[in-house]
Image (cartoon, rainbow, N blue to C red):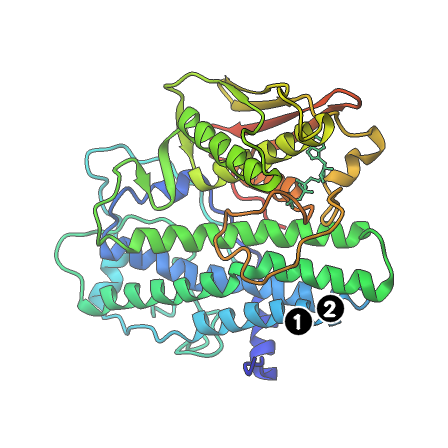
Amino acid sequence: MSWKASERLMDTIRHYAKFPATGVSLRQMVQFGEKPSVGTLFRASQFLAEELPIRLAHRVQELDDLPDGLNEMPSVNKVKEWYAQSFEEITQLPRPDLTKDVRSRLMKPGRAHGRSMFKLSEATPNPSIIEGDGSGWGGLQAGGNGNGKTRSYARRYFAMVDDNGDWPAELQLYNQRFAQTLHKIKRRHDSVVTTMAQGILEYKRRRQRMQIDDTIQSFLDRFYMSRIGIRMLIGQHIALTDQSHHRDPTYVGVICTKTNVQDLAQEAIENARFVCEDHYGLFEAPRIQLVCNPDLNFMYVPGHLSHMLFETLKNSLRAVVETHGMDKQEFPVTKVIVAEGKEDITIKVTDEGGGIPRSAIPLVWTYMYTTVDRTPNLDPDFDKSDFKAPMAGFGYGLPISRLYARYFGGDLKLISMEGYGTDVYLHLNRLSSSSEPLQ
Ligand SMILES: Nc1ncnc2c1ncn2[C@@H]1O[C@H](COP(=O)(O)OP(=O)(O)OP(=O)(O)O)[C@@H](O)[C@H]1O
């Protein structure tokens, strides 16, 4: 790798890291509707052009400050450079000069077409931003065309703007270029989880540690949670910008306003059983029974839900096969029960896979805890797609799934009866107005 962060860039990063991140709720993310206008997208780009560097800067700083030599591990450094490089790409992207007229149109609220708008909570005001330079851009950027003065109106994620009349071509062009940059960044960060895992392995080997301590555990929780948020905002923005092909009208970006739980659960069951058959060379994987109202729909990110279900089901199937023996004719059936409440949709996965000893329960939430004998090779290409995983092996399945659940205000809980089986409760918050958890 030839790219290296300069001291000047690191200074800018340290400056951005002083600002708090601004949370965005699922509800705010869907306010764009199916096809946002050029002006509305441009406003979102303005917000992200500041918000993403702030979030990236926090991570660079935190990676830099990791204790006990963890910050010196080659893979940890590699991840840090990716964050710094992405920071630079966003902050250096040339921005269009806006005429006074365009600026005021961008500031004028538009009308929602025939539908009532959700009431929006204000974004966290940024104390370091001074009102009034009129450039239409916030003033955080030290490089690029930032002129040193600042204003605050751009610090809002969703704002429907006045769309009467055409927007100048530069706006559209900028939106496209911004989305392309985000796309490149998203790809760069595809293998962050495995590369960080590699970094932790390097550290464990160097320090001869069996487990990671609480500081590192909570760092990883924060780090991966932040990654989910960054990828959510990036993925959402790319999907909203790309309006070239006809999309399902129930989708707003990567959010589906009518995520059908039964369909998704059925698909996750099939995938987990397939992986299980493949891994153990079974003619037929243990069966899984699904109890779910077929009409149950709610607003969620299908990709996240698939991931959580697939991970927990895989764990159950593995436990069932390993407890009862691979050559067993008939395995006990794992049950998936979906309950619909006003607040939560809860999915319970009940298996008869022998459970987990009580002393090991806290460990299942730690990164790198697994009962797989040999952790598979950490192939950097392994998680090129966000939601693919082998049968088992890194000890990331449960902690990462819990982060996905918590990201939108839900949770993941596990209760075991050692000697019998395990119940996993996946709570999904259906109100979805909770803001992102930011540390
Ligand atoms: N349903 C279950 N029954 C019994 N043990 C389980 C169950 N779910 C998880 N475990 C235990 O918890 C450990 C950690 O699970 P986790 O999903 O985090 O990692 P993993 O499955 O080992 O690897 P991967 O990162 O590929 O998911 C497993 O290795 C297993 O020992």
Which label was assigned to residue 282? none
Q: Amino acid at mark 2?
A: Asn
Q: Position of residue 296 (x, y in %)?
A: 40, 21
Comparing 285 with 74, the one in front is 285
Q: Position of residue 163 (x, y in %)?
A: 18, 52
Left or right placement of residue 219 versus residue 115 in this view: right
Left or right placement of residue 96 versus residue 10 in this view: left
Residue plotted at (65% across, 60% down): 196
The residue that disc 1 covers is 77
Structural crowding at the residue carrying mark 2, measured as other residues with C-alpha within 10 Å and reported as few (<14), some (14–19) or many (≥20) = some
Comparing 116 with 404, the one in front is 404
Q: Quadrant of residue 335?
A: top right
Residue plotted at (69% across, 72% down): 74
Q: Position of residue 262 (x, y in %)?
A: 43, 24
Left or right placement of residue 254 versus residue 331 in this view: left
Using the image, determine if residue 103 lies above or below residue 295: below
Q: Give the farthest residue toward the right.
A: 208
Q: Assess whether mark 2 and mark 1 are in contact (beta carbons under 8 angstroms).
A: yes
Q: How much space separates mark 1 and mark 2, taking CA atoms? A: 7 Å
Structural crowding at the residue carrying mark 1, measured as other residues with C-alpha within 10 Å and reported as few (<14), some (14–19) or many (≥20) = some
Which label was assigned to residue 71? 2
Q: Amino acid at mark 1?
A: Asn
